[in-house]
Amino acid sequence: MLKSFTARNFRCFRDLTVEPLARVNLIAGKNNAGKTALLEAIFLHLGPSNPQLPLVINALRGVHQVSADPDRIWGALFRGKETDASVELSSTDVVGVVRTLRLRLTESETVRAVPASETTVPSNGGALQTQGAGPATTALGARDLLLEYEDTAGGKGTSRAFVAANEVKLQQARLGPLPVAIFRSTRDPSAHDEIDMFSRLEERGEVGAILGALRLLEPRLQRLSVLVSAGVPMVWGDVGMGRLLPLAFMGEGMMRLLATLLTIARAAGGAVLVDEIENGIHYSVMQDVWRAIGEAARRNDTQVFATTHSYECIAAAHEAFGDSEPYDLRVHRLERVDDEIRSVTLDQEMLEGVLASGWEVR
């Protein structure tokens, strides 16, 4: 579990440090303060040997088509698109291990054939979208994206992504086992993933905890089951109507909470990142929802990072974690001062005072 995180030259951040981190971390701030960018930075950092992730985070923002120019593909990772500098993402965990991931664009040493062992990963599941047909020029693929990782426990490796034959090629470093990190964006339905995660929990007899949490939103819910309709598997629920209903018919909040809890269980021992966590959840049940999220995070030893625009969401989280021991919530408010973004971290006592005074914390 991370206790501090620093992002340098990534997206909108020149030099941002967020600390201390807790089991559950709620990230607040005005529009364009960098809340989603912070989630992306942590996500990249937690997958240091996966050179596909820079494409993944662009796709989560809805950017699926890219040109075959490396500076266009990866330039937005760098602050001000200044690709001559490097991105540095670093953390310290609770046992003192320091991990550092550096991303930089570097000139390719040679024009090379692509070995069969390398992986081809177009950004949108098909061929990489280019600006036109015709032969590639010597400029295409002239810059590689390097992901250079090292930690104080002895881990070290360099992964690479580059363009060849109008496709993104990946070379992945061999690192030891790493904790799972899962990013849930506002654009991410992930129905197939949810069915897979639900099935794993049902196999282990652990669906009961999920069912209890969902009853906070729908008290009539008696059981959950995966059924196939028109060839598509979905989670259905029994609310005492004589026949099951697709959970999606019970509201966005039900699906949002189910997805969050399933993801926390899937990332046991790792981290979950959720953008705009309050979406679809009524403020009147938000405190109970946070209580369920906290219990799931502790039960699965998962660290949670979530963004919000909602004052009610922050207040509800504070109340929910106030009932737990320890109080393992921190609120990190991102503030833009001139051309810099900084983080102000609020613990239980500080948050109590801010909320009691009615000060702006979103």
Image (cartoon, helix red, strand yellow):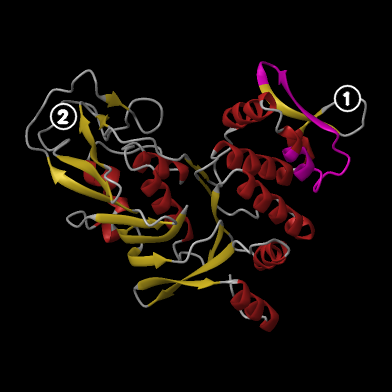
Q: How packed is label 2: few (under 14 Cα within 10 Å), some, or many (20 or more)?
A: few
Pick the residue in front: 47 or 96: 96
Q: Which region shows up in magenta?
A: 209-232
Please report whichever mark, 2 or 1, sits nearer to the chain's N-terminal start: 2
Q: Position of residue 148 (x, y in %)?
A: 23, 45
For image coordinates 55% across by 52% down, the residue present is 304
Point out the residue furthest to the top here: 231
Residue pictured at 69% horizontal, 55% vertical: 290
Task: Give above or below for 276 relative to 147.
Answer: below
Amino acid under disc 1: Arg
Q: Which mark is residue 136?
A: 2
Residue visible at 37% across and 40% down in the picture: 53
Question: What's under tag 2, amino acid-wise?
Answer: Ala
In the image, is residue 68 above or below residue 286? above
Residue 212 percent coordinates (x, y): 79, 42
Q: Which residue is mark 1?
A: 243
